[in-house]
Image (cartoon, helix red, strand yellow):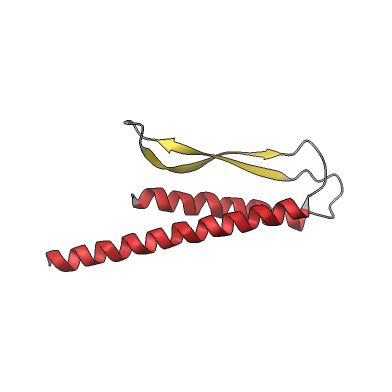
Amino acid sequence: MSLAISTSGLDVNQFRMNSTAHNVANTNTENFHSQQVVSSENASENNTASGTSVNAVKKSAETGVNISSEMTDMKQSEVVYKANAKAVQVQDKAMGTLLDTVA
């Protein structure tokens, strides 16, 4: 697994968490349209995964914020963020071990 894949996952999920926080903070704002982050997998030249990226931030056609949906999205982003952070940590440790072996 490439470090770039995990760090791109961290970036996208941080973006999602920020979007959710923005939506929740504006729950009582009149005529507020919640936003949704649209992301996709990046493909490299040989069609292997190379991470994810944010494609767009779309506004909902309807006004208002669905708090239960926002909380579900936030929890999902948190879990995926933690998984990517753990992958980065494991890769960092493996690289350190490899460098210790070479030195």
Residue drawn 50% across the image and 61% down it: 82
Residue 88 lies left or right of residue 100; in this view the side is right
**Is residue 74 placed above or below 93 in the rendered structure?**
above
Query: Residue 3's x, y, as percent?
Result: 35, 53
Tell which of 69 and 26 is nearer to you: 69
Residue drawn 55% across the image and 59% down it: 79
Residue drawn 72% across the image and 39% down it: 59
**Is residue 4 placed above or below 96 in the rendered structure?**
above
Residue 31 lies left or right of residue 43; in this view the side is right
Task: Check the image and name the residue furthest to the left.
Answer: 103
Q: Which quadrant holds the C terminus?
A: bottom left
Residue drawn 55% across the image and 52% down it: 13
Tell which of 55 and 73 is nearer to you: 73
Disc tally is 0
Tell which of 73 and 22 is nearer to you: 73
Residue 46 lies left or right of residue 99; in this view the side is right
Residue 92 lies left or right of residue 31; in this view the side is left
Query: Residue 63's x, y, as percent?
Result: 82, 42
Task: Check the image and name the residue furthest to the right.
Answer: 30
Query: Residue 17's x, y, as percent?
Result: 61, 55
User: Hey, which quadrant is residue 72 in on the image?
Assistant: bottom right
Query: Residue 93's x, y, as percent?
Result: 30, 66
User: Hey, which quadrant is residue 96 in on the image?
Assistant: bottom left
Tell which of 38 and 71 is nearer to you: 71
